[in-house]
Image (cartoon, rainbow, N blue to C red):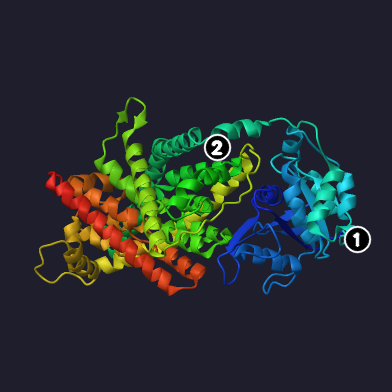
Amino acid sequence: MSTAVSRIAMVGNPNCGKTALFNRLTGSRQKVANYAGVTVERKSGRMTTVAGREFDVLDLPGAYSLAAASPDEAITASICAGTHASEAAPDVIVCVVDATNLRLHLRFVLEVARLGRPMIVALNMMDAARRRGVEIDSTRLAAELGVPVIETVAVHREGAAALIAHLDGTPPAPPTLRADHDDIHTAARVIMDATVRLTNPGPTLEDRIDAWTLHPVAGPAILAVLMFLIFQAVFSWAVPLMDAIDAGVNLVGGTVASLLPVHSALHSLVTDGIVAGVGGVLVFLPQILILFLFILMLEESGYLPRAAFLLDRLMFKVGLTGRAFIPLLSSFACAIPGIMATRSMADSRDRLATILVAPLMTCSARLPVYTLLIAAFIPHRTVLDLFNLQGIVLFGLYIFGIVGAMAVAFVMKHVRRDSSDHALLMELPAYRMPNPRDIALGLWQRARIFLKRVGGIIFTVTVLLWFLASFPQPPAGATGPAIEYSVVGFIGHYLHYLLAPLGFNWQICVALVPGMAAREVAVSALGTVYSMSGNPAGISHQLGTLIGQQWALGTALSLLAWYVFAPQCISTLAVMRRETNSWRVVIIALVYLFGLAYLASLATYQIAAALGAG
């Protein structure tokens, strides 16, 4: 058997199990990047068969049609057609279809077949189809389509064995469509009648579950409980892991520092800069991964489209649509993929409104700041002997961001005087148990991205901040901490004139500047500033105790309000610019987000001060 590398492109409608099948074929041998010039995600991997044959596998963005209506579909269509500028044409197209919803997916299969490229149809989720009483004659289906049809169950260990064995054999030939299949819609109906039989036409398990999850009263209640439990888990489950990482960071930092001259610049860089900065952010990795764990499980289970349907009426009233739910939920992890996810929205007005409010969703980068302040100022106790008070406060901050986003969308709707009706048409996929392998791969990829930020952006900003906080040296006879005479000290004191009404001290003002690179950098910046301000306790694991002693409660609440709204992430603004191709949109976002942040912080601090907490 030849060992020459062949290229496989995997295509399919959203929610067909394509990515799960891609994970089954490639395992951990994957790379995630963006296509040149656009923010569409490019996921590729390498597969080696039993016979030793190697394949480059490309997981293309989900598409409903090759007549592209979005950047995602445009990428998929051009690669399948072999016309993409920077991507070679695939040797084989594997078109993945959901066996439980074959009628919808057949139209796309027929479109791909008309390209005339070698093709295999992977009839996925066959186990779910059989449970629902759907019998598919795959042999007859292959004859009707003129391509091989292979049954797969991507979530099972051997669920892709038949597909791998077929790829190991003779390369597939181009499709041979029948002459009476010229009209795609008619052909799909004819093929369905010839190949599919329902043996159990009664209500399915999915129907019975949907009776509760889509109920106008029970549905929203279930969604609210799910969200509340997620934020409780973010605080409660992460504590042991955070303590272990914290101990490891301090052990490594102490060991390295002990090998360096005590009063040298290098010792200060390691202890006050790198350990206080990078370590102070790394400790929050467990909380971020727990949040991602729940988002991935909801996505894998098929629940997210139902939540979008459930919230469509409410979101429409405030100027959004149900289609905005998934991009906005993705923004809870990070606003960047949330903004990118709006590409699937056909209406440009809905897409722009979603992009503008996505930064108001409480992304995982805010978690280090929220956790630091909540742990320092909110008592660690239970409410009703059941709920964690700190988790309740965190949940409240998320709700604050959601309410703010809805208010902004409502204002935008009336400013643009949009009274048109935007109907929501969405496929509801079958429920399925989240696959542990896919969840683990998703968490690993997100952990790598976070660690890359820690090792790249945060490390660089921390070292730069240490340098600016160390020079110039204080003049002869100076009595204050050296940092007050540095570049950072001057910046902090000048910004303090503007931000003092918010209750911010000059150390907070300093931390907000590098925090523009990424929100979580503010924690490392505070660690560095306090370490170099003559506070030996100002290192990552004791920073919360330190600020709890030195800050007023009103200051902490004001800073929390600031981070609910402030656009402290240059990467988000850059993606917003690329997705809209407009600096005007970015400027609008900057003005309204900073304006809301200032007003919210001002009101929070002044009210707290009036109540004696300032």
Residue 587 relative to residue 84: left or right: left
Q: Which amino acid does label 1 sit on?
A: Ala
| Quadrant in which residue 437 is drawn | top right
Identity of the residue drawn at 65% across and 48% down: 15
| Residue 266 appears in the picture as rendered | no
Q: Name the residue under label 1.
A: 179
The secondary element bearing badge 1 is classed as helix
Residue 504 relative to residue 295: left or right: left
* Label 1, label 2: how far apart the Cα atoms are: 43 Å
Q: Indicate the position of residue 356 as horizontal and vertical percent values.
A: 42, 61
Q: Indicate the position of residue 157 as horizontal and vertical percent values.
A: 72, 40
| Quadrant in which residue 532 is drawn | bottom left
Question: 445 or 432, which is in the foreground?
Answer: 432
Residue neighbourhood size for the residue with mark 1, other residues' Cα within 10 Å, grouped as few (<14), some (14–19), many (≥20):
few
Disc ID at residue 214:
2
Q: Earlier in the sequence, mark 1 or mark 2?
A: 1
Q: Which amino acid does label 2 sit on?
A: Leu
Identity of the residue drawn at 35% across and 66% down: 590
Question: 259 or 175, which is in the foreground?
Answer: 175
Question: 132 or 422, which is in the foreground?
Answer: 422
| Quadrant in which residue 88 is drawn | bottom right
Residue neighbourhood size for the residue with mark 2, other residues' Cα within 10 Å, grouped as few (<14), some (14–19), many (≥20):
some
Vertical arrangement, residue 379 with respect to residue 465, above or below: above
